[in-house]
Amino acid sequence: MLGAERCARLLAAIQGLPLASGAEITIEANPESATDDFLRACADGGATRLSLGIQSTDARSRGAVGRIGEVDQVRRAVGAARRLFPGSLCLDLISGLPFQDERSLLGDISFAVDSGADHVSLYALTLEDGTPLAKRHRRGAAALPNEDAADELWLRGRDALEAAGLLQYEVSNFSRPGKESVHNSRYWRMESYLGCGPSAVGTIVDEDSATAERLSWPADADAWLRRPEAHEPAIELIPRKALIEECLLMGFRTTAGVDEALFSRRFARGVEIFIGGALERRRAGGLAALDRPALNRDGLATLNGFLVDCLMELDATYPKYEESLR
């Protein structure tokens, strides 16, 4: 929606900030907005990473979920990105789409790999209440695979990506070595980050108190543009227990797992003090790493159930921990 000129202005402003050496600068776009001028503006403005939401190269699947842009347009945009943008290329795909089968998903993955993408996000389709697709599904008008078939389809996609050298480093994210997303990794580690602009969210962690504040900016873009200085974020306090929960929920999404050193500095206790039982059960089942608080490749496929176990155990262990701090 920015277009080439506004993108260039934004990147110029970013380059005027005191950036760290080699800072990652990611721009996200849909294929229909990735024009040659836009791609040149990204390259000239110093963007280091471009993320294109292609979702699928199957026309029926794209149409069923209301994606704008024809398949040819998707292919042209990715080709232009490889030609005009020298940085890393990330492509987003979705599995479990209407009309999708193993052949079409593997075709999407082959397209992404052949394009030279350094990073691929493979998301499992989630039906959100109130969306047009959810309404069509309830009426029986959306040909979605059942849950077991959708899970198996995603696993086939995971295997194909890893066979092509794009390794899973987070539940839905795969990259060539050294091409992992820096900014997403910061969220998964539950480190501080700043959100700027309408609808943006930021989280500032107070390491001394092991609490955090979440800042959420109003979503009204028109009002923001009229008087940006007049807006203040809503501030939500995240107490210590909730911060522990978020560290577990985010950290276990990754193959590296929860950063044990950061967690111990922050909470003065190791991860296993809180959820040792849940972790040991996964290890006994061959689903977790033995040397760190992390699920392995197979364990990540059971992430949701494991996190439920973690939060239940945390409810039981936290009062004793809280008492030890007094």
Image: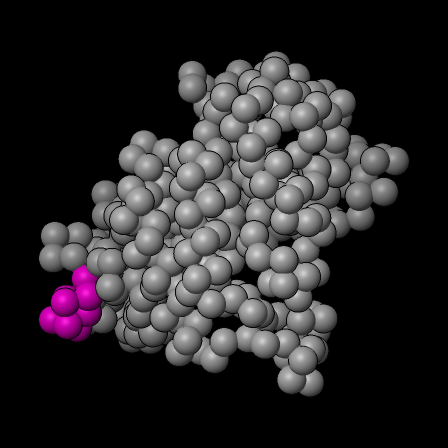
At which x and y percent is residue 10?
A: 68, 24
Asked whether residue 67 is drawn in magenta, I would say no
In this view, the residue farthest toward the bottom is 139
Compare residues 155 and 130 and report the one nearer the observer.
155
Q: Is residue 299 above or below residue 119?
A: below
Asked whether residue 282 is drawn in magenta, I would say yes
Residue 128, picture quadrant: bottom right
Q: Is residue 169 visible?
A: no
At which x and y percent is residue 214?
A: 56, 49
Left or right, 259 with respect to 154, comes to left
Q: Is residue 62 above or below residue 167?
A: below
Q: Residue at x 38, y 58 (%)?
A: 157
**What is the magenta range?**
281-288
Left or right, 30 with respect to 46, comes to right
Quadrant (top left/top right/bottom left/bottom right) for the C terminus: bottom left
Q: Residue at x 64, y 20 (%)?
A: 40
Q: Residue at x 66, y 17 (%)?
A: 12
Left or right, 166 with respect to 10, comes to left
